[in-house]
Amino acid sequence: MTKTYVAYGLALALILFVVLSLFILPRRNDSLDWPGAASLDGRASGYEMVEKKGVGDDDSKTNTGAPSAPYATREAAKPSGQPELSPPVASGDPQTMESWQAARAAGFVHESPAQLVENLANYDDFTGAWVIGSYTLGSPGSEMRMLINLIRVRRLLEIGAEDPSMVTGLLRTALIDALEQWPPVLREKMYPTKPAEDRSEPDDFEKVLRRAIAATYLLGELKDYDALPLLNHAFMTQQGWVQSLERRWVEQAPVPPSMSLYAMHRLIARIPPDRVRPQAAAAHAAYLQFAAENIPDVIIVKGQSLKVDMIRYPPMSFRDGEDIQVGGYTKMNLTDRAWDWHARMAAFIELNFP
């Protein structure tokens, strides 16, 4: 009997060694010479850390156009020349992380802004982003890692950096539509009434989810200050769903609340003084003071395979480490302190965009 146990033990040890060798130990390689090697600390997809920016720090281009309707805008995109990207890596060339990403990027260079928004959930991009960083449905951190590794998101940032009007109208429309479409697509996801769809294409749930998250992030990064009322409306609508909808294995709302809060924060922290109405000046100054004491600095990662720098991810905690979100697996509920953060931003938005 003892010999049998010993034999079983040796067999299990051998199986464990093989599993570790094939699937786990290779992933500890920090080299970026193979597509799956990128870590989750900002080095993914040919990115490198370059700087931290404090509250109010600005970039070179600012969307300071005339104010427009807060969340009824559905502009059509104008034709635009697309910036050239690196060509696909030639057959037989070393497949480094940067060349692999450049090859992926070249596949989307001819899509118009409208097509980029329409195709945000497509697997030709989604699968590559999944390879780069681990992804867990409903995890705010995972959603941000996924977002910054989507080539189409980075293309929209590139185009918007040159001319924000090329994409901001499309993004507002995408967010408005997502708010309208979410309740029925969520219901269908939870209680299917249709035959199973072809899984070679994203379903309606995935499409609405990706567009809502990307639009929220991009409107904040592209300095669409007039989108602040829309973002606030979207945040409050989604928090209403979080409180009222039955919790299942999928999110009750498409955008993690920390991402919505951070998009609003990025806009309020960078809004030019001449865009602040006199009646909102005190609320704006008070918010900047609060943010400097409580909201972590922005961590910027520099793009190599695409000409765009991006924030790594919105903070999941305050400067002192206290969590912003609570509530089990999906973490869609907010702490009282996070609600106070939102109230300070909402006070400025209501005064500045009456």
Image: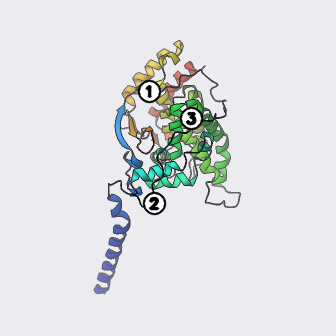
Q: Amino acid at mark 3?
A: Phe
Q: Is residue 1 above or below residue 207?
A: below
Question: Considering depth in this image, is 184 or 263 the residue closer to the camera?
Answer: 263
Choose the circle earlier in sequence order: 2 or 1.
1
Q: Amino acid at mark 1?
A: Ser
Residue 142, image x and y in percent?
46, 48
Residue in the image at 49% along x and 45% along y: 147
Q: How is the image coloured?
A: rainbow
How far apart marks 3 and 2 lie (CA) works out to 47 Å
Task: State which mark lies toward you, 1 or 3.
Answer: 1
Task: State which mark lies toward you, 2 or 1.
Answer: 2
Residue in the image at 65% along x and 60% along y: 198
Q: Is residue 140 above or below residue 26?
A: above
Choose the circle earlier in sequence order: 1 or 3.
1
Disc 3 secondary structure class: helix
Question: Considering depth in this image, is 279 or 213 the residue closer to the camera?
Answer: 213
Q: Quadrant of the C terminus?
A: top right
Residue 13, quarter of picture: bottom left
Residue at image mark 1: 60
Choose the circle earlier in sequence order: 3 or 2.
2
Residue at image mark 2: 91
How far apart marks 1 and 3 lie (CA) works out to 28 Å
Residue at image mark 3: 235
Question: Considering depth in this image, is 198 or 345 the residue closer to the camera?
Answer: 198
